[in-house]
Amino acid sequence: MPEVATLSSLKRLVQLPRSFYYDPPDQVARGLLGKLLVRPEAGEEARGRANAGGNHWALAGRIVEAEAYFGITDPAAHASAGKTERNFVLFGPPGHAYVYFIYGMYFCVNVSCQEEGIAGCVLLRALEPVVGLDIMGRLRTSRKGVLSERVAARPASGPGCLCQALGITRAAFNNVDFTSAHSPLQIWDDGFRPGEIVVTPRIGVHKDADRPARFLIGENPYVSVRPRRPRKTMPCPEAR
DNA sequence: AAGCGGATCGTCT
DNA sequence: GACGATCCGCTTG
């Protein structure tokens, strides 16, 4: 099912123009479902472990899950406290990559949207591999050289997994322009249109935890499968 | 199926 | 000095 194409075999590809990214985050998140996140000639820039596939390869995956973050008015958003050294990309022009480091170990990538000065964004949470499934597996291989069948089959299902599978780091990708023809990270439309779109609360979010802002393609096996957020522990009134 | 703890560190209080 | 827009492996039911 995955690995249906090489990059050059894909037809009718159109890189999303800047104008696509001016809409509000929830609208952009829906619009991104079904689009292709592409690293053209990824091997050119890859180093070390990331270069395991050789010198000339491309990676592409279909976006099947994304979350909307609503800028300074959204308590769950990184932009809620205003512009900082970390999140400045969100306040710039739309269609750029905001990459941040999380839990001391992982990266996550967002697509900035809305006009300059307005800090809306969309967190990319899961891809269906389309080009380079084998390379994605190598990039997901642990330091100990372990690559489970489960991970190899769904290497980009989760925001941290997605960045690892595509070799996305903050140093190399923060603030890159998705709309540039020469960008190392691009978003293309190949004509695919998702069927049913499902909306749920965002994953791992505690502030404004019930807001429906996570969008995914229904029935798609590559969406991240995560446990429901832990139930609040209720204090026992008898205990003192 | 769900819950936990460990790994690991930049960012902001 | 505490806390994540996470992931994985192990334990428990």
Image (cartoon, coloured by chain):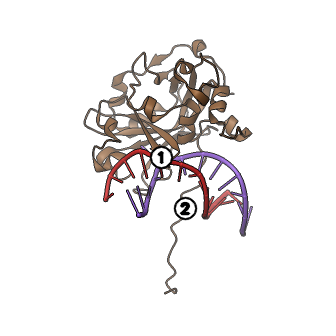
Chain colours: A brown, B red, C purple
Residue at 61%, 30% (x, y): give it: A49
Q: Amino acid at mark 2?
A: Pro
A197 to the left or right of A114? right
Query: What percent of the width, then of the height, locates residue A65?
Result: 52, 38
- Measure how far apart labels 2 and 1 are at the Cα level: 20 Å
Q: Which chain does tag 2 point to?
A: A
Which residue in the structure is indicated by mark 1?
A: A102
Which residue in the structure is indicated by mark 2?
A: A230
Q: Is residue B3 above or below residue A97?
A: below
Give me the disc on residue A48. none
Q: Is residue A69 above or below residue A176?
A: below
Quarter occupied by residue A50:
top right
Q: Is residue A234 above or below residue A34?
A: below
Q: Amino acid at mark 1?
A: Ile
Asked whether residue A60 appears in the rendered view, the answer is yes
Q: Secondary structure at mark 2?
A: loop
Query: What percent of the width, then of the height, locates residue A227?
Result: 59, 54
Query: What percent of the width, then of the height, locates residue A143?
Result: 65, 40
Few, some or many residues within 10 Å of mark 2 (<14, 14–19, 20+): few
Q: Is residue A91 above or below residue A57?
A: below
Residue at 74%, 38% (x, y): give it: A149
